[in-house]
Image (cartoon, rainbow, N blue to C red):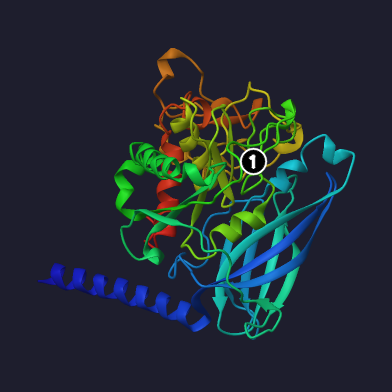
């Protein structure tokens, strides 16, 4: 009887906690989105941010209990504060393509400005929004843009955007209690929309055939947005090929032939304005190997290459769970300032050993040497193997092989990070 009463009490407390969190969301926010379009400008040495516009949009699909992000992830962070009391009421971190550009040789020679966009829940009261950037050398955040937002302001755009064809590929429940994955069509003409629908179904199965996603399928809703492009395919600027497509994507990002991205965040956010959205994957109707992904921003890959299914999962690992690349011998567009070995990187699956205690140390067997020798006897062992994050020396990864290195199964550290993100976005307690 005592045990039963204790369990009942704990369940009651958990229920009250969830109800309190929901009440807190309802106190501060409506189930709509405040979209913030802003410009990042600068070069390798410095950066600034400036507001472009605010939009009210009709859907909020994010968590309503887990409102402040527990992960110390990302190169940028958006925070929403109660303007009257200064209390933090919402936070998320993210990466941008501009952040990557700042580590290229080009950024050492010129200054550029790139448009970006993020969404937060729509406030009921006046709030203060702060967008901060992380210094890669110190790993500390500092404010780039602060806004006082009055939800009744006449300067907030409240207009409707284009109603694209929305595909409900998988629906498991209320968006605020599920991870809402949205596939966007890029380079699919009006006559190729059935192909896009079939590709969404194919890639959905690819994701949920991959551990640890396979065990968490019921925590996902999957949507497709059938954007119509004037031409099939995508830009291949290195070969002089340019296409008129919905999202202005292309290979040769930063001069790297396989790096497939788009700088056009405005078009991406316009496409998901009326869809619940926690994660975006852009399906490009092209045959050539390539892709890209940035944490809590978007991931992208081609639909028709034979290796596309694993490329998709790899790139989604970047954008969904903040996972770093674990390879170190392939050509990349960045210089050696992308990671500083004197500080601990924020990504959960690489370490410089500066602060390994907060990474995957608890996943090691007690007799595992740190660093761990890369040899056949350790082939299946979780350890600390040198090489990762584009550097052969000074950065370490958890397994000799992993989805984030060479498309092997996700290692335990990556799997845990994915599971933690699913729990966060599906409004479940950490576990």
Q: Nearer the viewer, residue 1 or 152?
A: 152
In the rendered image, residue 251, in percent from the top left (x then y), is placed at 66, 33
Q: On the picture, is 189 further left or further right than 145?
A: left
Q: Nearer the viewer, residue 213 or 182?
A: 182
In this figure, which residue is indicated by the disc labeled 1? 261
View extreme (right): residue: 109
In the rendered image, residue 331, in percent from the top left (x then y), is placed at 68, 24
In the rendered image, residue 70, in percent from the top left (x then y), is placed at 51, 59
In the rendered image, residue 278, in percent from the top left (x then y), is placed at 48, 57
Question: Tag 1, which secondary structure?
Answer: loop
Q: Quadrant of the N terminus?
A: bottom left
Q: Residue at x 42, y 75 (%)?
A: 21
Q: Quadrant of the C terminus?
A: bottom left
Q: Is residue 396 above or below residue 170?
A: above
Q: Is residue 283 above or below residue 372?
A: below
Q: Quadrant of residue 197?
A: top left
């Amino acid at each position: 009887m005592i045990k039963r009463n204790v369990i009942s009490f704990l369940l009651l407390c958990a229920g009250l906690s969830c109800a309190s969190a929901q009440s807190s969301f309802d106190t501060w926010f409506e189930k709509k989105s405040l979209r913030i379009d802003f410009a990042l400008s600068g070069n390798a040495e410095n950066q600034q941010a400036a507001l472009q516009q605010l939009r009210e949009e009709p859907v909020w699909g994010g968590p309503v209990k887990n409102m402040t992000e527990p992960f110390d992830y990302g190169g940028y962070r958006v925070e929403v504060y109660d303007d009257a009391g200064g209390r933090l009421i919402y936070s998320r971190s993210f990466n941008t393509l501009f952040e990557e550009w700042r580590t290229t040789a080009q950024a050492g020679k010129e200054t550029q400005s790139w448009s970006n966009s993020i969404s937060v829940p729509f406030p009921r009261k006046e709030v203060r929004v702060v967008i901060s950037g992380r210094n890669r050398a110190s790993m500390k955040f500092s404010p780039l843009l602060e806004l006082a937002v009055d939800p009744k302001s006449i300067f907030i755009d409240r207009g409707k955007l284009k109603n694209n064809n929305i595909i409900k590929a998988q629906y498991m429940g209320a968006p605020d209690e599920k991870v809402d994955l949205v596939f966007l069509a890029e380079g699919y003409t009006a006559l190729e929309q059935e192909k896009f629908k079939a590709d969404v179904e194919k890639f959905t199965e690819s994701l949920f055939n991959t551990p640890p996603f396979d065990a968490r399928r019921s925590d996902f809703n999957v949507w497709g947005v059938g954007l119509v492009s004037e031409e099939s395919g995508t830009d291949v600027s290195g070969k002089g090929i340019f296409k008129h497509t919905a999202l202005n994507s292309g290979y040769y990002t930063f001069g790297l032939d396989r790096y497939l991205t788009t700088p056009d965040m405005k078009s991406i956010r316009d496409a998901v304005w009326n869809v619940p959205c926690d994660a975006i994957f852009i399906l490009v109707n092209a045959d050539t190997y390539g892709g890209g992904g940035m944490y809590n921003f978007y991931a992208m890959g081609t639909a028709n290459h034979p290796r596309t299914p694993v490329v998709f999962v790899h790139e989604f690992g970047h954008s969904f769970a903040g996972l770093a690349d674990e390879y170190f011998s392939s050509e990349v567009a960045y210089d050696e300032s992308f990671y500083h070995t004197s500080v601990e990187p924020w990504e959960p699956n690489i370490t410089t050993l500066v602060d390994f205690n907060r990474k995957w140390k608890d996943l090691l067997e007690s007799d595992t040497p740190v660093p761990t020798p890369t040899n056949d006897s350790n082939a299946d062992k979780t350890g600390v193997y040198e090489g990762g994050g584009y550097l052969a020396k000074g950065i370490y990864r958890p397994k000799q092989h992993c989805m984030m290195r060479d498309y092997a199964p996700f290692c335990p550290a990556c799997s845990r990070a994915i599971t933690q993100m699913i729990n966060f976005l599906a409004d479940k307690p950490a576990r």
